[in-house]
Image: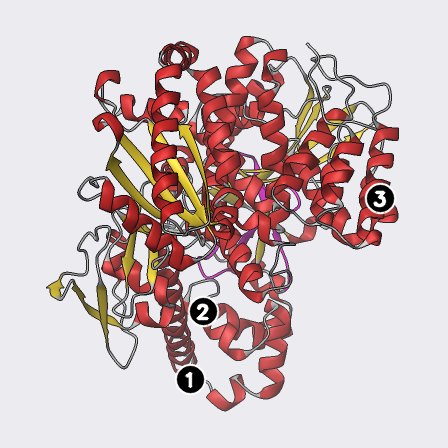
Amino acid sequence: MKTNSITYEVLYNKIKKVFKNQEELDIISKAYEFAKEKHAGRKRLNGDDYITHPLEVANILADLNSDYVTVAAALLHETVNHADATIEDIYKNFGEEIGNIVKSITKINRLELKDDQDSSAAYLRKVLVGLSEDVRVLFIKLADRLHNMRTLDALPPQERKAKANETEAVLIPIAHRLGINSIKSELEDLCLKYTKPDIYNDIVERLESSREELNDLLNDMKASISEILTENGIEFKIKGRVKSVHSLYNKMDNGKRWNDIYDILALRVFVNTEQDCYLAIGLIHSKYRPMPGRFKDYIANPKENMYQSLHTTIFGEGGNLFEVQVRTYEMDEIAEKGIASHWSYKEKGSVKIQSLMEQKLEMFRNVIESNNDVTSDKEFASNLNNEFLTDFIYCYTPKGDVLELPKGATPIDFAYRIHSGVGDRTIGALVNNQIVPLNYTLEDGDIVKINTSKEPNPNKDWLNFVKTSQAKNKIKSYFSKIDKANYIKVGKEMLDKEIRKRHLSFNEVLSETNVNKILKDVKLDNLEDLYLSIGSLRFTPGYIIDLVYEDKRDVMDVYLDRVSNYFNSNKTNKGDIIVAGTDDILVNIAKCCKPVKGDEIIGYITKGEGILVHKKDCPNIHNTDRLIDVSWNFDSETSYDTDIVISVIDEKNRLLDIVTKASVRDVYLEGVSTSIQGLETIYRLTVKTKDSESLNNFISDVKSLPFVKEVSRKNN
């Protein structure tokens, strides 16, 4: 079913009021003509010309006061994936800035959620944010999804639900954290419409049945408040609305019956100045009794996303409850459009705005970084939901600065939110002038004072209760530096001990010539790195000394001599690989064939990298004189990385189908690259697995997928 879509003329008339620079307008027009040509003759599923979609996306972004680069990139955003343009075409015709944005959005749009599992949502969100080095990429993605959700009726019911689930799991949290309420609110309603159609339709029907009555109540209150403000000489505008379907659903989902929901009606008052906001709210309270505990002053204490407004709930006409918000016009701009409206708004080039945008992306990256050691997708999803989808509280410093924190945060989270130096030196906290333990759970409105020491002294136990990824990252970073210093100290002591044990001279072993030779052989930069490698058990002290002395014959000869003199074949090995002959040898997995536990393997004696363990059929083994017998230590629980190449005959992105197969076989995705070769899509995956059995089962599962042509282990 065709829709009444926007035309470029309408869009142009809108943007020329924002962009006064003709050069910027010309670039947007050029982008439209380019996209129109590339999409010529193509139709959307609902019968619209395909060009209507990028036009609508650009229009949504124009309403957010986005800059000309974002609007132009929005017009071009599907010319690569859904037309015959190349990224090179975009760079050539529109330059690096627009090219980089289109390149990122092209990658993102090839991702799609294939199931309702949290793990898939977590993977998508991780990749999406990882690709979005420029926050404007996220603006385009959100606008792109909003228009697709508006036209979702063109898809079959099951696909509608899948797309809505993806939106709910991945994009709404991002819109929320970027403060783009106008997009977030509409997406929430649309998601509810397709994921819970019965509930959605029931709420809509209930609202429609009382629409006339609700409108009458709103009009009466608008007239009454207008009269109060006019009498007192305040210039204003006022809007009335029935709360969104999704917000009413949340109230019912939290246990309220329809007849118990009283605050369905909302009014928003716009005034010219901050002073008028307080005057207006005071006049409204003078006539209508406010509900206790429902007044919020976000003007004096803005939220971290710059949101400002006065909120109150009053007993209005007929005893009905009304939520009233009072704000200036500029405050409303921020509240509805978030930081998207400020890229080209009044503060273009503002360090504050640019910094705020980067903070939003950094928040996502911090969460992802702190979960890098989490191998379970479900655990990763849970951690992200705790960080992004939880309720937020607003706490204050003694000077009145407001900090936004997730519900459940502690004074340690508060301290690290102020500055990493404050967090590292925290020794105590006062909340509302009362001493509290550092694992105390903060509440909305708390005033928090952090007591600090002169020197940093964090505690590893803090990791057991801190809530924010920022705090976790900073604590881990501190101890990582401490551990590094300890490893260096231990490594130096180990090497000194080995030198004394062999009755050698310190000055001779560690002469400038010998140190340079050692560093060159083991590919390190300085002596401190060498000590670190010994202390962290990457190299043994004996191996390092052998590089100086026994290597004068040839290191591989030394290894072979050790093997020939080895008699105790039942010797206990604690490493992952058992090397015939000795424990005192550096062992590494070859990067070319990446064997995993259970593969048939052979050792290859190198100079500087110890024994490299290859698959026996690795084509990179040439010199058989350097081979040495090795075997797996099956008592070890180490997991291994290896590479898989998958050839798919399908235009759709099938990565998540493949990832789903991996998760049930205890195989985890570490990295991915994609390329197109003719009609085939080639996925090159780096996966982590505990053994060859799990890996082979995964390969068999992938081969069974109907769109998969070939699966193979990769040998470089």
Q: Is residue 175 left or right of residue 322?
A: right
Residue denoted by label 2: 534
Residue at position x 71%, y 38% in the image: 74
Q: Is residue 631 left or right of residue 311?
A: right
Element class at badge 2: helix
Residue at position x 46%, y 30% in the image: 169
Q: Amino acid at mark 2?
A: Ile
Element class at badge 1: loop
Residue denoted by label 3: 88
Q: Is residue 615 above or below residue 163?
A: below
Residue at position x 49%, y 58% in the image: 565
Q: Earlier in the sequence, mark 2 or mark 1?
A: 1
Q: CA distance from mark 2 to mark 3?
A: 47 Å
Applied colour scheme: secondary structure
What residue span does the magenta drawing correspond to? 581-607
Q: Amino acid at mark 3?
A: Glu
For residue 503, the mark is: 1
Q: Nearer the viewer, mark 2 or mark 1?
A: 2
Instruction: Pick the residue in front: 94 or 343.
Output: 343
Instruction: Pick the residue in front: 149 or 29.
Output: 29
Q: Which residue is situated farthest in the front direction here? A: 231
Q: Position of residue 546 (x, y in %)?
A: 53, 72
Q: Quadrant of the N terminus?
A: top right
Element class at badge 3: helix
Q: Main secondary structure of the magenta part?
A: loop
Q: CA distance from mark 2 to mark 1?
A: 20 Å
Q: Is residue 397 above or below residue 51?
A: below
Q: Are marks 2 and 1 in contact (CB under 8 Å)?
A: no
Q: Earlier in the sequence, mark 3 or mark 1?
A: 3
